[in-house]
Image (cartoon, helix red, strand yellow):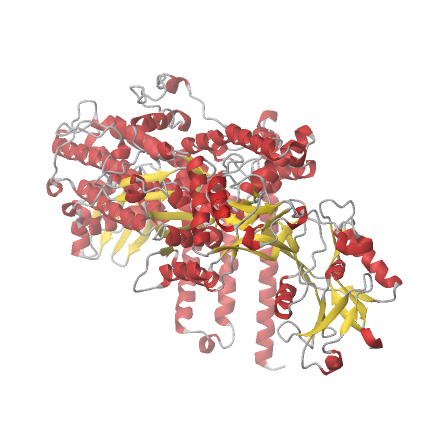
Amino acid sequence: MSPGIEEADVIKKKKKETKAKEKELKKQKALNKALKLQVMAQQASPCTSKTSKKKIVRLYDEEDENAKDPETPFGEKKRMAGQMTKIYYPRAVEKSWYEWWEKMGFFLADANSPKPPFVIVLPPPNVTGTLHIGHALTAAIEVASLHKFLSLCSPSVRVFKENCMSFCYTQDTIIRWRRMSGYNTLWVPGMDHAGIATQVVVVEKKLMSEKHLTRHDIGREEFVAEVWEWKKKHGSTILQQLRRLGASLDWSRECFTMDQKRSNAVTEAFVRLHKQGLLYRDNRIVNWDCVLRTAISDIEVDYIDIEERTLLMVPGYENPVEFGILTSFAYPLEEDLGEIVVATTRVETMLGDTAIAVHPNDERYRHLHGKHAIHPFNGRRIRIVCDEILVDPEFGTGAVKITPAHDPNDFNVGKRHNLEFINIFTDDGKINQEGGEFAGMPRFKAREAVTEALKKKGLFKEAKNNEMRLGICSRSQDVVEPMIKPQWYLKCNGMGKQALDAAIDDEDRKLEIIPRQYTSEWKRWLENIRDWCVSRQLWWGHRVPAWYVVYQSDKPEDFGVVDARWVVARNEEEAHAQASDTYEGKFQLIQDPDVLDTWFSSGLFPMSVLGWPDDTEDLKAFYPTSVLETGHDILFFWVARMVMLGMTLGGNVPFTKVYLHPMIRDAHGRKMSKSLGNVIDPVDVINGVTLEGLQKKLLEGNLDAKEVASSEEGLKQDFPNGIEECGADALRFALVSYTAQHDKINLDVQRVEGYSIWCNKLWNAVRFALSILGDEYVPPSSVNPNVFPFSCQWILSVLNKAISKTVLSLESYELSDAATAVHAWWQYQLCDVFIEAIKPYFSGNDPKFVSERGFARDTLWLCLDNGLRLLHPFMPFVTEELWQRLPSSGSHKRATSIMICDYPSTIEYWTNERVESEMNLIESLVKSLRSLAKESRERRSAFVICQTILDRQIICSHQVEIETLAYLSSLTVVSPNDCFPLPTESDGYVMSDVNENLSVFLKVPRVKADPEKIREKMEKLILQRENLLLMISAPGYQEKTSEKIQESNARKLASFEKQMKSLKMQS
């Protein structure tokens, strides 16, 4: 054996032994820990072993009970107690302020104001329920939620509505900031009638569960009255929630998409678009829901991928239905030419087949060009057509069955070859009279029956697994049926081009999309836009303003068939006048029973809320609006349509900026869904709620027993002790700070609780500051920071930077950065440094600090006044309460409320880069000393060794600040050249390098070390040292390892040895 191999074996052996030792050490450590826990458990009393529940609502202690605010009559300015409670109570602080703000008219906009306008239209929450945490963010940026009905809406609409409230806060932050910045701010509240969601998901379901009736049982008029009653009961719930969230909306302009003014706007838009040739009626393939009996939009269709034979439950069927199967069967050919085999995943649709397509270049079927097959069940002649667009000769048999009335691709083939379009389904998904022997069968029962009939005729070939995408209606969970239906369509090519150019034309950009990356999605959608189907087969919504001319001889089934007989008008009287000019004889007009897609009225919202089509003062003053804030998932479905309609009907884009916020998810990254038990009402986070309270709310919705059980389990896992009272301010700040996550927000309620704790710190910082200012303090009319103490100059300089950073971030809609800048100044500069640094001035009334005390008071007042105004858009309630307690300046009359004060702006002469640089050095020094002290506040002596004269001068001149902030009893500053003995570990000092020019030594008390801990640490260090030595002594180490790594390993080895030496001294 060669010496090299022998040496390598020895190293391997040593490594193996070292690993074994490490394993044994870990085992022993775990065992010791377990024994300690066991002893502690045995020593504990029985009551301590019980799970302690955290307080849901903060209760007053005896001392704070005496500082409770007196009752305030509704709408009056809040009456506050003379003294402040020592704990922040969110519910008490947030009480009464909103009602006073609203009564004072602080939210109102003036169309005749000379101030520049800043306008936001609140994405209208649905009328169908209450708000949840997903909507809260918009109110913080703006406001909105759906509590009882969200889990039943389509995911896209659900996310739109749930995130509307979540971003309510962000919109309110922007509005409050702009209001304080001198703008004539208008934030318009509205509510959406949510056509399909309200009718089907809520009211129809309610009718069935309470009265066992369908809408058809009670008729259209009575059903619509039921929906209005629902709106009357539940509409105000949302509005009260918005108020509780602090949303500063102009309630005098509140509107509803189905109120008279908005309804008139919808009618006018339809009429004008029709006159411009942009609205037309056509018979096309739509997404049909057989349960809801209406066409649904693409946004309401979810797709599931099926890889093989799969059984799924479908509404209306007792047994699961089979999907993921490709069925092959043969059509017999005329002229005894044999048969042609086709395949389909929807074999029942063969009842509506009117052609078989082959590729013109496929030699297998060249002899069949122009021939016919025979339908096996009704004898219909089926043309063989050549279509190179649809048919891939390499796929399957190369022959494709064509059902023009029930497949989008087949529809196009039908148009190209002038085929017959045969609809085989009734509106509720049964086979109609065109199905012959299968008429009356539900479609999926017919699937089985047709397959069996084909087998009996010997035409069935095979059924095999097939990958497919299945469209599911996100509202009813029904399988979407492509079906040809006459509908109203809006031409979108020209309008889409206008909307596209508005965002991408560099020379004349009218619309900015934030974040910028969504512009490419805007481009993708609008370059491939299709005409928009705007009609729905519902009763709740805006009735299509079109009447059909009906003659006595017409058959009922022919209603609407002749496009030329449709008359579009503003009302029936106008329709009669138009029809009389065109049609002769005796006729009657029957209005189209359909209603318009909810997105149509929503698309007009930025104009209709300002009074369009009338030329109102509001429209002249506030259109176009300033910014739309919404979710990126509806960039096309809502935003693009608003832009298209706004430019076509309003002559301009409806807003100049689009701010797309992240989607709210729970802490695990899941969508908000009641079936998961993760839909949280923001008011529950504000006021606090027990687990039982959360679970009780599940029973108020429309969930079935299984969903309730699943949701209860989800709530139990996420909120075992309920949710602690956090307050609206903490929720607002948490949600705004989350906006840095651009696509999704994984909302953790614990983070909200953390900001509630921070509110308590803020509260007590101001409380302490007010005690320093005293009752007699009068703020100065002007200040000269140059004569102020060092710490006062510094805090004003960094306040300037915080103001600048906050304003720049707000202007660029980086709201999280703005929140971070405000929070960092309050927390880490004002509270942690400045307030601590000035405490010596007020300790013991030392006469040498007389002038410092005066300057510190003035600086403190400036900080509180500016800092609270800086924070107000994010936390309106607590800042109003604290600001109202500040002494007011005697030189000029103060504003009535903080919300109508000026927003802070930078003051050039406050900035002092030299002072900031010196404080950076001081903070680094203090950080090292605190680290050595392990954050203990016991005062100790310290030494600092300075390598440069400048550092020594700075430290000597700010010795008081360093001693105060680092909790030192004394600080000795020395240079390496000084004849001064350096402190050592044996003297009880520990050392740390601040940087290459500074080292600090701190006196630490000698504490008798735990022998067991010393032994564990020593064993760990020995193992680490041995591992490192093995690596260093390995063959080829010097040659294969870089010089940088070798130097690093040498430093590690020296550190291990130093630590081992220190442990030996302690033992």
181 displayed left or right of 318: left
> Disc count in the image?
0
Say which quadrant the N terminus sits in.
bottom right
550 to the left or right of 639:
right
With respect to residue 700, does 991 lie above or below? below
Q: Quadrant of residue 910?
A: top left
Nearer to the camera, 888 or 658: 658
Residue 51 visible (yes or no): no
In the displayed structure, 1032 sits above or below 902; it is: below
Q: x, y (%) of residue 962?
A: 24, 43
Which residue does the image show at 72% across and 78% down from the upper left?
A: 369
Q: Report the front residue among 560 and 1012.
A: 560
* Residue at figure coordinates x 65%, y 50% from the top left: 558
Q: Nearer the viewer, residue 681 or 991?
A: 681
Q: Is residue 720 visible?
A: yes
Q: Nearer the viewer, residue 408 or 744?
A: 408
| Side of 84 where 632 appears, left or right | right
Query: Could you say where residue 539 lies in the image, as x and y percent from the top left?
Result: 58, 39
In percent of width and height, residue 256 lies at: 45, 36
- Residue 822's place in the image compared with 39, above or below, is below
- Where's residue 398, x and y in %? 72, 75
Location of residue 505 (image quadrant): bottom left
Picture quadrant where residue 400 is located: bottom right
